[in-house]
Image (cartoon, grey):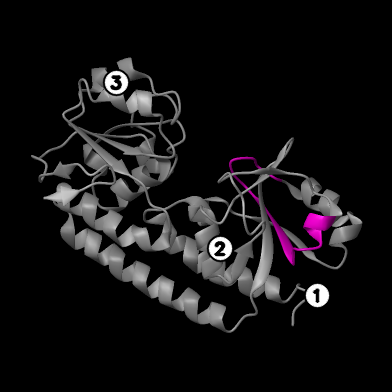
Amino acid sequence: MWRDAAGALHQRAQQPARIVSLVPSITELVCDLGLAAQLAGRTGFCVHPRAILKTVPKVGGTKDVDLAKVRALAPTHVLLNIDENEKPAAQALAQFVPHLIVTHPLGPLDNPPLYRLLGGIFGREPAAEALCAQFEQAYDALGQAARAWPRRRVLYLIWRQPWMTVSRDTYVSRTLALAGWDSVPAAATLRYPELKLDESLLREVDLVLLASEPYRFRERDVAELRALPALQGKTVALIDGEMTSWYGSRAIAGMNYLARFRAQLNGQDTSRA
């Protein structure tokens, strides 16, 4: 049996299962485990892999699940995440879905257990172990590269009006730390705090990264921040938010991406030691 993030024990699913995934990165993982044929539903934000998901019905968003559509699909299993899905929706789903599988990765090292959880429940252990091997290789490579780089303090922005960032108690921040980037502020009450881009804050940072999600920053935002006096001579760049915030199989590509991205920025970083 396999235990999920809510503490529930799951037996191996009878085949074929009917899976509804309410988490974009988990949907991608389901497909990479070879379970696409058993995917009965997804959210509108579940967009990878695009070609496969075109024919999979949508059941609303991660925060506004259409319960009637889910019920009509008659799933045997619904995949949830503690941060991305609302508790009332999970409670409602529990009334008519036989199995709810709850996930909650808090950092990169939570990915191999996630692969094994879904691989075990749905009878895809060899595929899960293959992903674990790929993860270990990417994790070790990024760690080795990061040890050769000076650590840097990064302001990772995810929203504007108001400006918002990530605290160190997030999956994103722990992923950035693997690449040698320590997120600012060092301490925050909220996991996704609002902030003001005042001089006292910007003096602390070595670089600013503008994520592509949930807010899609663009080059005009980069130009705006580069013009701030406190950021003169510091690196300001766009970054693919999926590569830092998506867990599951995307975490493997994400770590490889971060190794290349950090190496590229090192050549632009005028504040390097």
Does the CB distance between marks 1 and 3 fall below 8 Å?
no
Residue drawn 43% across the image and 40% down it: 83
- Name the residue tied to disc 2: 176
Residue 173 x %, y %: 55, 58
Amino acid tagged 3: Ala
Queried whether the magenta region covers residue 208, the answer comes back as yes
Amino acid tagged 2: Leu
- Name the residue tied to disc 1: 270
Residue drawn 30% across the image and 61% down it: 112
> Tag 1, which secondary structure?
loop
Real-space CA distance between mark 1 and mark 3, rounded to the nearest whole angstrom: 53 Å
Q: In the figure, is residue 138 to the left or right of 130?
A: right
Lower position in the chain sequence, tag 2 or tag 3: 3
Residue drawn 51% across the image and 54% down it: 169
Residue 217 x %, y %: 70, 45
> Tag 3, which secondary structure?
helix
Q: Which residues are magenta?
A: 200-217
Does the CB distance between marks 2 and 3 fall below 8 Å?
no
Queried whether the magenta region covers residue 257, the answer comes back as no
- Name the residue tied to disc 3: 92
Q: In the figure, is residue 167 to the left or right of 32?
A: right
Amino acid tagged 1: Thr
